[in-house]
Image (cartoon, rainbow, N blue to C red):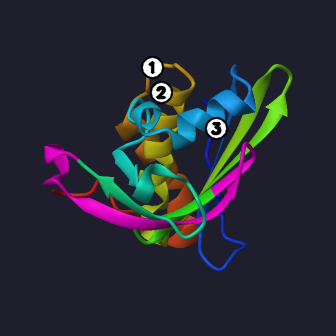
Amino acid sequence: MTQAELRTDGARPAVRLERELVDPPAVVWRAITEREQLRAWFPCDVDVAGGVWEVGAAIAFRFGEEMSDMTLTGEVFVVDEPKVLVFSWGEERLRFELAPHGSGTHLVLIDELPADAAARNAAGWDECLDRLAGLEPGDWKARFDTYAATFEPLVGPQSGPPTA
């Protein structure tokens, strides 16, 4: 696990996370774009209209009963296979960058978000990216507490997990 970085140099705050993955970019691309593979690591079901990641495609993000069957919507902004994928996730914007790293992939995830969601999302994405890397997720609460202590002086109070 690597520590998420809080970026405050853009129009909105963003958390930036990195992982070194053993699979090459083409394989990782499928893991971030194929619905069945996303279910293994992404925090909700991802349904792209027409099943094709293309600029302008609508996305539905469906959470289960633990989140009162909440659904967020999004839109695809950039598809540059197998290098860059950018889409909105509710009011956030996610950017996945993939680059070859030896026989594997260097993955960068940037989540532009509301300032009070930085610690919550950094902890959550740490868990998700651990799953993507085939690792057992760590302790979300401990990660959240660490990120909240680090991020609060920079962007203000941090919200905990969403309440259903």
Name the residue carrying label 1. 136
Compare residues 130 and 24 and report the one nearer the observer.
24
- For mark 2, give the secondary structure: helix
Q: Looking at the image, which residue is at 83% across and 32% down?
A: 100
In the image: residue 24, left or right of residue 39: right
Compare residues 72 and 11 and report the one nearer the observer.
72
Percent position of residue 163, x then y: 19, 57
Q: Is residue 69 visible?
A: yes
- The mark lying in front, picked from 2 and 3, is 3
Above/below status of 95 relative to 106 = below
Mark 2 neighbour class, 10 Å CA radius: few under 14, some 14 to 19, many 20 or more: some
Above/below status of 51 relative to 31 = below
Q: Earlier in the sequence, mark 3 or mark 1?
A: 3
Name the residue carrying label 3. 29
Instruction: Look at label 1 and name its amino acid.
Output: Glu
In the image: residue 140, left or right of residue 164: right
Q: Earlier in the sequence, mark 2 or mark 3?
A: 3
Compare residues 72 and 148 and report the one nearer the observer.
72
- For mark 1, give the secondary structure: loop
- For mark 3, give the secondary structure: helix
- Region of the chain picked out in magenta, as a range: 64-85
Q: Give the position of the N terminus as an image quadrant.
A: top right
Q: CA distance from mark 1 to mark 2?
A: 6 Å
Confirm whether the magenta stretch covers residue 77.
yes
Residue at the bottom extreme of this rendering: 11
The quarter of the picture where residue 136 lies is top left
Percent position of residue 88, x then y: 50, 66
Percent position of residue 93, x then y: 54, 65
Name the residue carrying label 2. 131
Q: Looking at the image, which residue is at 42% across and 46% down?
A: 145
